[in-house]
Amino acid sequence: MSILPEAERPNPYSAYGAHGSVLVLNSGSSSLKYQLVNPVGGEAIAAGTIERIGESGGSSGGIVSHTFAGNRTRRELEVPDHGEALRIALGMFDEIGPRLADAGIYAVGHRVVHGGAEFSGPVVVDDGVVDRIEALVPLAPLHNPANVQGIRVARELLADVPHVAVFDTAFFQQLPAAAYTYAIDREVAAAHDVRRYGFHGTSHQYVAGKVARVLGRRVQDLHTIVLHLGNGASASAVRGGVPVDTSMGLTPLEGLVMGTRSGDVDPAVVFHLARNAGMSIDELDTLLNKRSGMLGLSGVNDFRELRQLIDAGDDGAALAFDVYVHRLKKYVGAYAALLGRVDVVAFTAGVGENDPAVRAAVCEGLEGFGIAVDADRNAARGGERIISPDWTSTLVMVVPTQEELAIARQCVEAVDGRRPAAAVTAG
């Protein structure tokens, strides 16, 4: 099946008319990422990052980057907190462009990592919503505090427009109970909100919908495996636009091998290291979240550097690559079994979109399942594209994710008080 030309793809968002722009904010523990997005046309008008928030001291202070009209401005500044970071970002818009006063901002969208079992979609922010997000901090102590701080500061500085929270976990609130339930004492699980929540949901939902749109198919008719492979990595099985399983769990630690995270390990590894290595809870947290994955196995977490090590004959790097691919194949096979049939395997995010060696290795040996890649198509660059040969029963695709655009469109839906089915499924 060929990809439908862009001009022939229906754009469900054109019905919204001219809503102006949406400012999307992603507040991390020591960073702020922002993008001004046209939710109808889909283009990023301007974007920027502010890193090393809270650090100080000359060249080790904050790093500010702002891109507009093809020009990138980079500065080093003192950025003591998220309040100052947002003030700097707003100042960059005024100084370099585009002026937010002239951009017709319709809403400010906030990426929130954990919405717990409470939030199953985007929500217009008020004081009660902020309090409820803050109450979820025990489930995401590394992420939600910064998300809450970013929302509070932005509501003060941009008080004249609605603010919308969009949750990484929301899409996976549709998981069946058999997929989200852990086999531990049910009273303990209920008392402490222990279940599979899943993450990267905005990306998985966007890509599953985008696959349908570029193929000219209804998302309701497709069974899709989405492989979101970046420094953080996750897989999902999506049947008819609804997720039936995903690899991340209570936290983003479970599942695939990632840049610095271990992914799946025997839980008794934690007990073993606590008892025999004397490691504390905090040390174990750091080990599994920041010193494991590709970094722990090879010393690097950038796949370009990993490839250089492999080419130089580094056995540790070669093993790291094999472990990474082995885990991915296990999830593809498991999700094929859950779905019953697989119409599309879609690779997305930094590694998934840009590393043909990973894509080829994952699909190698799966020809009996109707999954394969064509070497020439896989090596090509570009936007969304089919990389499988014509004979396969399953399409293998590369579909760039656009999480900021997905957040912007969900903001429009939330502010308008409508969430049309076409908008949810069309990507």
Image (tube, rainbow, N blue to C red):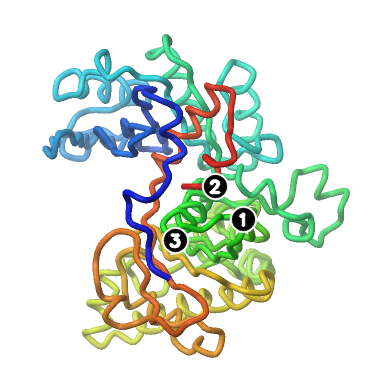
Which label is found at residue 13?
none
Q: Residues within 10 Å of mark 2 (few under 14, many from 20)?
A: many
Task: Please tell me whether mark 2 or mark 3 is closer to you in this view.
Answer: 3
Instruction: Report the side of 82 relative to 78 (left or right).
Output: right
Question: What residue did someone put label 3 on?
Answer: 215
Q: Residues within 10 Å of mark 1 (few under 14, many from 20)?
A: some
Q: CA distance from mark 1 to mark 2?
A: 8 Å
The local secondary structure at tag 3 comes to: helix
Q: Which one is earlier in the sequence, the residue at label 1 or at label 2?
A: 1
Question: What residue did someone put label 2 on?
Answer: 425
Question: What residue did someone put label 1 on?
Answer: 220
Pick the residue in front: 38 or 79. Answer: 38
Q: CA distance from mark 2 to mark 3?
A: 13 Å
Q: Residue at x 53, y 56 (%)?
A: 283
The local secondary structure at tag 1 comes to: helix
* Callout 1 amino acid: Gln
Visible residue check, residue 54: no
| Residue 144 figure quarter | top right
Q: Which one is earlier in the sequence, the residue at label 3 or at label 1?
A: 3
- The location of residue 403, given as percent across then percent down, is 42, 44
* Callout 3 amino acid: Leu
Q: Residue at x 24, y 72 (%)?
A: 380
- Up-down relation of residue 281 to residue 342 (above or below): above
Q: Which one is earlier in the sequence, the residue at label 2 or at label 3?
A: 3
